[in-house]
Image (cartoon, helix red, strand yellow):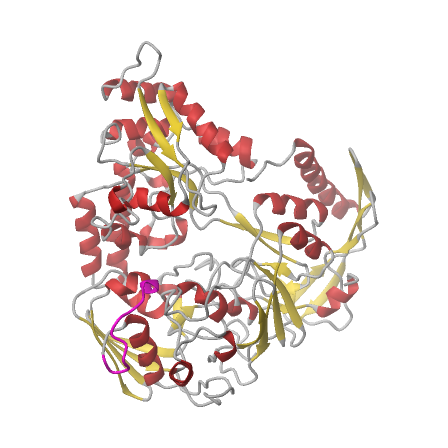
Amino acid sequence: MSTPFSPRWVAFVVSAAMLLVFAVACGETKTIEVPGETVVVTKDVIKEVQVPGETVVVEKEVVKIVAGPERVVITEVQVPGKKYVTDPTTGKVVSAPEYGGTLTIRQESSAPSSDPWIDFHAGQLLDGVSERMAISDWGLHRSVYNQMSGEPPMAAIRGELVESWEIIDPLTTVYHIRKGVQWHDKAPMNGRALTAEDIEYSWHRLLGISDKYGFTEGPSSSGILKDMPIESITATDENTLVWKLSEPFFDAQRQILVNYAFWTQPREVIEEHGDYTDWKTVVGTGPWMITDMVRDSVLTYSKNPSYWGFDEKYPDNRLPYFDEVKALTMGEEAEIAALRTGKLDGSLFGSAGLDLDEAIKIKKSNPEMTMWPYAYRSVTSFAMNVSKRPFDDIRVRHAMQMALNLREVNETIYSGLGIEKPYSMLGEGAGGFYTPFEQWPEELQGFYTYNQEAAEKLLDEAGYPRGKDGIRFTTKYWNSPDKNNGQPLDLEIVAVDYWDEIGVKVEFDQAVDKSAHNAMKRGLEGAKLDGMASQPWGYNAPPMLILFHHAHSKGAYNYMRLRDEEYDGLVDAATDATTAEEQERLGNEANMRLAELHVVLWYLKVPTYAVAQPWLAGYNGEYSLSAMRTKGSFYARIWNDWDLKEALGY
């Protein structure tokens, strides 16, 4: 459960910010008195570092926490002879890339398997070891694409193992495989060249689409790909792969290039061992090789000395920069301690990240660390069965939303750090598939805005007047036992209190385990959602539109039991679109149709935080280089400023 910033901490932040501005101007040392501690901030004389073509101002800042052991932090320090460069994606001046050393990062846990056929979470291990046909372009300016979505738009995608591609017609694409890519120099691959047949084999195994390699059945882990109408995937020569669909499919090109389930797999390894479940047998083409793993303890990657790739920002630099990466599994308190003592270089998105409580602790004790917020989706919103009374009346759904004071909840529980503005199924990370709340029609904005009086009027109009006991109707609410998909209890209580104020009584029913909860929402085995349940919403993933569209018969992703011909027609039209722009336009209209139908009650999006030590360079809070590309791909493109780390005493 996240807790708010205390008034004392808010006062400290504001005071500290004002102090730093004053100190820069006056060059003096100031002391801030805060109950229980004293903070002294000293600014040294401002110095200049000459960089060809520009002047970089570097200042030395010393922060001492007097209470307890003294801790000295230098956020920036000039080192004689140090080279600086401008990051072309942000315009920021950073220390020039350096090679060598070990990157030490926290990870949440080890993936259950290294075999993507068995579990798509294999990407947690394989990213940076294995590669895909394409990847999000790390060299794009962050104003064009900020790398904060697991589902990059087509405009942000560049070839990885595929150098280029040609769309012959809406159903046929020819992919040209990159030359000069080698498998790791590890038996049984022994550094041989990658071929189009390797990629053909990997697709055939994942999807089970032919008898050529003996794979006639694909796994459930292939997700949206298992529904793709594939006619053939054929390597026509060593460097050419031809994909043919039997009919148009929503988002097909992007799914082929960057889908989370696909990783290029070594045929010789799988034929020798029968599967790909032992990390010791993993062989890829990426910048890293797995050299040690103690499950749920430590994962070690070593540099691939013959990696083909170069830094997209600094094209003369071959990747990776570090010699080694150690990803440690640890709890919250251990993580905080490791960051404070410099034993961790950071806790980055994808490897771990901090929740709000952890972020507050780090920001308070170590203000020199850089932090970035990110929210992939809301896990605090509410789904309703819109096929049954009372939620089959849209006025009831509008009223339930208008009873929720999102601003008050955000300020009280999340110190204003939650995202209040409502989303439909897709959020801001979905690019052209998303319309900001400010651009919604005025009437629709009103249905998502707190207005208790208007909510009561809508319930009266819908035929749910208050009874003698003040209650209009009673319904049930089920929370998910899954911490990643469920509401914190205090949020539930606050929502129930708001609904009670408009005469709607919501009763808790949480006596179900995770599997029973999922069965209830999906309508499996006779169980059905009768009332409300916690529901992830506001995704950054456009494929959710097609998953929702295809879910009518199964209930998956459509726990609300929605049937809407207009929505289905828009998704069908987007599927048949011949350009990315047309698909985004139609997909956006489908997304807005869900907002109009108000099938989910919006209830905030709460961020997690990436944090990096001041010496970790090249990272700017990026979340992903495409679905499940949140570890090794980053690690290959960042480096440590070793002089700064030494100057800080670590």
Q: Which residue appears at 22% of the width and 56% of the height? A: 574
Q: Quadrant of the C terminus?
A: bottom right
Q: Which residues are magenta?
A: 211-222
Residue 33 position, x and y percent, is: 80, 35
Question: In which quadrant of the rendered view does residue 95 lie?
Answer: bottom right
Question: Who is closer to the viewer here, 247 or 468?
Answer: 468
Q: Indicate left or right for 111 with 171 as reference.
A: right
Task: Report if residue 215 lies within the magenta region.
Answer: yes
Residue 171 position, x and y percent, is: 19, 71
Question: Who is closer to the viewer here, 298 or 376?
Answer: 298
Q: Which residue appears at 48% of the width and 63% of the height? A: 141
Furthest residue in direction top, as rendered: 468
Q: Which residue appears at 30% of the width and 12% of the height? A: 467
Q: Indicate left or right for 295 with 557 as reference.
A: right
Q: Indicate left or right for 570 with 225 as reference.
A: left
Residue 462 visible somewhere in the drawing: yes
Q: Is residue 31 above or below residue 502?
A: below
Task: Report if residue 242 lies within the magenta region.
Answer: no
Q: Quadrant of the N terminus?
A: top right
Q: Is residue 287 above or below residue 612?
A: below
Question: Who is closer to the viewer here, 485 or 544?
Answer: 485
Q: Is residue 16 above or below residue 304?
A: above
Residue 443 position, x and y percent, is: 29, 31
Q: How many marks?
A: 0
Residue 139 position, x and y percent, is: 48, 68
Q: Which residue appears at 65% of the width and 54% of the height? A: 335
Residue 32 visible somewhere in the drawing: no
Q: Mostly what secondary structure, the magenta segment?
A: loop
